[in-house]
Amino acid sequence: MKKYFIFTIFFLSLFSCNNQSNSEIVLEEKYTEIVNNKLVYEVINSVLSDKDNVYRYCDAVLNRKTVIFLNNDSTFIKKFDTIFSKNDKKYILKQYRNGNKFILNQKFIQNKKVIEFDTLTISSKERKAKFWEKVRKENNCVGYLYVPLFNLKKDLAIIECGDSGEGGTFIYRLNRNKKWELFKTIEKWIE
């Protein structure tokens, strides 16, 4: 009985949101549409077609986040203190937590191939290695992009994207011509 109690406590503490420090978990829950999907895909396609963005070399993109880092949301939202209002940040945080469950749909993506991330790859290192080997063989470059996060007015969108060589977090703005354009680079990395 004591073993089961200890196992239960360990299991609960392992998956408790309050006590985790950047632990990885698997995506299983369903995405809830907080912002209209038409607007979400409008921004995604703008980012994917931006010739100055990291996707200029990639023809393929993963359909979902491969891992989630818990408690990352508090660090993430602090990056935007001077750009968004308090109410915007609450709205963005709600989208961010829900966005972990977002899956790209190929029928809404223009000019890129969407690769389905095989969630079974996490069950063994061997399967994971075979999956990535197959993906690399079939595609010159594979990128990732996470669901855009909007302010309340829906004229600014935060998006994290990249590929195996570079990436970052960017803010896109809806311009006078109703087109999404890069407004600000929050952080950028190059490997």
Image (spheres, rainbow, N blue to C red):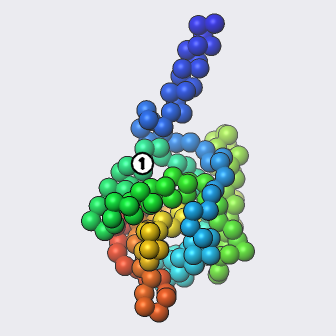
How far across and how far down the image is residue 76, in percent?
38, 55
Which residue occupies 58% across, 18% down? 7
Quadrant of the rendered image containing residue 98: bottom right
The residue to which callout 1 is attached is 72
Q: Nearer the viewer, residue 114 or 71?
A: 71
The N terminus is located in which quarter?
A: top right
- Decide: is 21 above or below 12: below
Q: Can residue 73 be seen by looking at this rendering? A: yes
How far across and how far down the image is residue 154, in percent?
47, 74
How far across and how far down the image is residue 52, in percent?
44, 82
Which residue occupies 51% across, 67% down? 148
Q: Nearer the viewer, residue 144 or 84?
A: 84
Q: Is residue 58 left or right of residue 139?
A: left
Quadrant of the rendered image containing residue 62: bottom right
How far across and how far down the image is residue 132, in percent?
64, 55
Which residue occupies 66% across, 57% down? 117
Quadrant of the rendered image containing residue 171: bottom left
